């Protein structure tokens, strides 16, 4: 059994036609990603270790399915995790006060939600799924810009 292979299926989730084959590497990478987020929300430096494992596993996935742009993005996330771990481990009392974590003010949070909703609505208006039989990787659907009325 090759752990790093996306063909090593843990479970098939009944989504869509034929289901979704969730590989072990994807499942474990997702768990590490969720743990990274959870530890970051608790302000624990260990979050970076889980983040490094997460992006490494997803880099292996993206390499196998030939999504090289996403693979390069994982390289950036790996570097960002290393930098974050380094910067967080070098804190002292002087710069700790400057890095105090705080909540976004409600007015700005509502503005952010409104902007996101408008962006989603615009995306829905401009791009609709269309049928494209020539590309087997799209599952028959792709985003096609709507032209005219």
Image: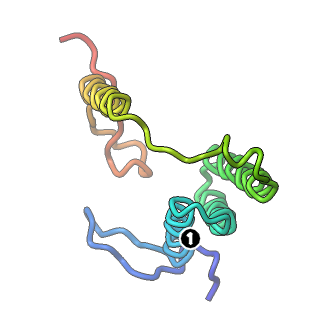
Quarter of the image for the N terminus: give it. Answer: bottom right
Q: Residue at x 79, y 53 (%)?
A: 92
Q: Residue furthest top?
A: 148
Q: Residue furthest left?
A: 149
Q: Quadrant of residue 95?
A: top right
**Nearer to me, 52 or 145:** 52
Which residue is the site of mark 1?
A: 32
Q: Residue at x 63, y 68 (%)?
A: 50
Assign a secondary structure to mark 1.
helix
Q: Quadrant of residue 25?
A: bottom right
Percent x, y of residue 103: 44, 43
Q: Residue at x 33, y 35 (%)?
A: 106
Percent x, y of residue 89: 78, 59
Q: Quadrant of residue 109?
A: top left
Determine whether 98 is above or below 35 in the image: above
Residue 50 visible somewhere in the drawing? yes
């Amino acid at each position: 059994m090759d752990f790093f292979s996306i063909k090593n299926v843990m479970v098939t989730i009944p989504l869509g036609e034929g289901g979704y084959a969730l590989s072990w590497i994807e499942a474990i990478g997702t768990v590490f990603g969720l743990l990274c987020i959870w530890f970051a929300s608790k302000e624990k430096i260990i979050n970076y270790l889980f983040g490094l494992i997460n992006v490494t596993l997803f880099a292996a996935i993206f390499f196998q399915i030939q999504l090289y742009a996403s693979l390069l993005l994982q390289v950036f996330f790996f570097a960002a995790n290393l930098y974050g771990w380094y910067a967080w481990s070098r804190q002292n009392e002087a710069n700790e006060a400057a890095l105090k974590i705080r909540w976004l003010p409600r007015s700005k949070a509502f503005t952010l939600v409104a902007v996101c909703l408008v962006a989603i609505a615009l995306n829905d208006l401009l791009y609709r799924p269309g049928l494209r039989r020539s590309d087997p990787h799209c599952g028959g659907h792709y985003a096609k810009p709507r032209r005219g009325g």
